[in-house]
């Protein structure tokens, strides 16, 4: 390419981000630049490569054949350059100004991040932590493209090829409001099934879960009256109604206004894991963050 001298590293970083996002506005947000600045850089890239690179599509933009050819070599080159210029000195949390981004659902926020937060702030007071919504379908892409540093998810359903650390095994308990007339003691299985239940359906609209699978093995069903997308809304519902729910124990034990008892049947629990990509595996700051979160549990 005769116009290589017109390209600098910033333009190549912009091109890599544009190819990942396929949207000028989102690329500008990731690069901390204005949309007009990114548009100007895209124009320079088009001139240098003699190709449109990205063309309008029904949603966002679509890469040209030339852009598709550039994507992987460009990413590999930028990653190699990043490793080459990365500092080798040990990570000093007391002086660090790192901004970390982690993906967590509301349950993981309460059960994992909240216990670790005080220690993190005390040890690394100049750092920042951004918590973003955990969407399992985006897990691999967000970690691979360094949109997030860590992803908290159950071990089951975690994307293969990622590094993982199991943080704890969670179990379910039965919870309802303080003073609930049916939760003065552990209910019988028949009483349990007759209660009105709330379930969390992360995808939205579901009325069954692990508890229903355990009941089905016994030929039983329960009354599921409400389905919600978030655990924290469920806790508010329980505190204000006579509905009950099978809650993860770590959440139930810290929620205000709830009565917690053992359920009359065994419902399989799950492992909560911390997941990250190979590109962050050896980074000293990232290793420190992982250890800090695990130590806070």
Image (spheres, grey):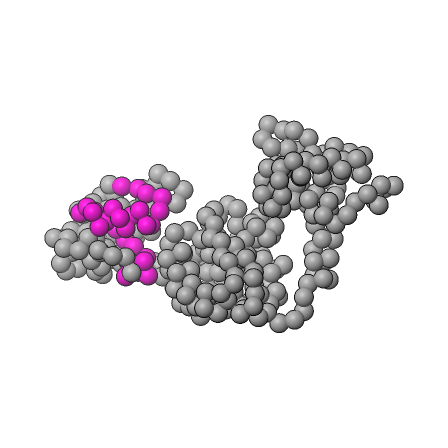
Residue sitting at the far right: 2
User: For this view, does 244 lie left or right of residue 148?
Assistant: left
Quadrant of res 156: bottom left
> Residue 121 in the image: x percent, y percent?
45, 65
Q: Is residue 245 magenta?
A: yes
Quadrant of res 258: bottom left
Q: Is residue 156 visible?
A: no
Image quadrant containing the N terminus: top right
Residue sitting at the far left: 181
User: For this view, does 187 lie left or right of residue 11?
Assistant: left
Q: What residue is drawn where x is 29% and y is 55%?
A: 247
Q: What residue is drawn where x is 25% and y is 43%?
A: 224
Q: Is residue 140 above or below residue 203?
A: below
Q: Nearer the viewer, residue 25 or 161?
A: 25
> Residue 154 in the image: x percent, y percent?
44, 56
> Residue 186 in the image: x percent, y percent?
17, 59
Q: Is residue 102 above or below residue 47?
A: below
Q: Is residue 142 above or below residue 86?
A: above
Highlighted range, magenta: 226-253
Q: What residue is drawn where x is 46% and y is 48%?
A: 133
Q: Nearer the viewer, residue 173 or 285?
A: 285
Q: Nearer the viewer, residue 57 or 48?
A: 48
Q: What residue is drawn where x is 50% and y is 66%?
A: 124
Q: Is residue 126 visible?
A: yes
Q: Is residue 255 above or below residue 124?
A: above
Q: Nearer the viewer, residue 68 or 117?
A: 117
User: For this view, does 54 lie left or right of residue 291?
Assistant: right
Q: How many marks?
A: 0
> Residue 84 in the image: x percent, y percent?
73, 62
Image quadrant containing the C terminus: bottom left
Q: Is residue 114 magenta?
A: no
């Amino acid at each position: 390419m005769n116009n290589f001298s017109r390209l600098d590293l910033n333009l190549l970083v912009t091109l890599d981000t544009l190819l990942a996002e396929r949207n000028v506005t989102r690329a500008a947000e990731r690069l901390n630049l204005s949309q007009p600045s990114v548009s100007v850089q895209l124009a320079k890239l088009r001139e240098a490569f003699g190709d449109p690179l990205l063309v309008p599509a029904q949603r966002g933009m679509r890469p040209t054949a030339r852009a598709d050819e550039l994507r992987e070599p460009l990413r590999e080159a930028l990653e190699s350059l990043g490793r080459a210029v990365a500092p080798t000195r040990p990570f000093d949390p007391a002086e660090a100004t790192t901004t970390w981004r982690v993906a967590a659902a509301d349950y993981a926020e309460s059960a994992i991040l909240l216990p670790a937060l005080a220690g993190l702030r005390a040890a690394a007071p100049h750092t920042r932590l951004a918590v973003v919504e955990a969407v399992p379908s985006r897990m691999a892409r967000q970690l691979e493209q360094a949109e997030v540093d860590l992803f908290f998810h159950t071990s089951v359903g975690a994307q293969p090829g990622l590094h993982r650390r199991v943080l704890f095994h969670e179990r379910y308990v039965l919870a309802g409001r303080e003073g609930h007339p049916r939760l003065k003691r552990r209910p019988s299985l028949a009483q349990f099934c007759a209660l009105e239940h709330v379930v969390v359906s992360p995808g939205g609209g579901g009325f069954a879960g692990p508890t229903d699978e355990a009941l089905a093995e016994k030929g039983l069903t329960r009354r599921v009256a409400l389905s919600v997308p978030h655990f924290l809304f469920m806790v508010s519902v329980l505190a204000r109604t006579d509905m009950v729910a099978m809650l993860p124990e770590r959440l139930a034990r810290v929620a205000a206004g709830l009565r917690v008892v053992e359920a009359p049947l065994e419902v399989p629990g799950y492992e909560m894991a911390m997941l990250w990509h190979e590109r962050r595996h050896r980074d000293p700051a990232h290793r420190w963050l992982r250890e800090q979160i695990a130590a806070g549990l």
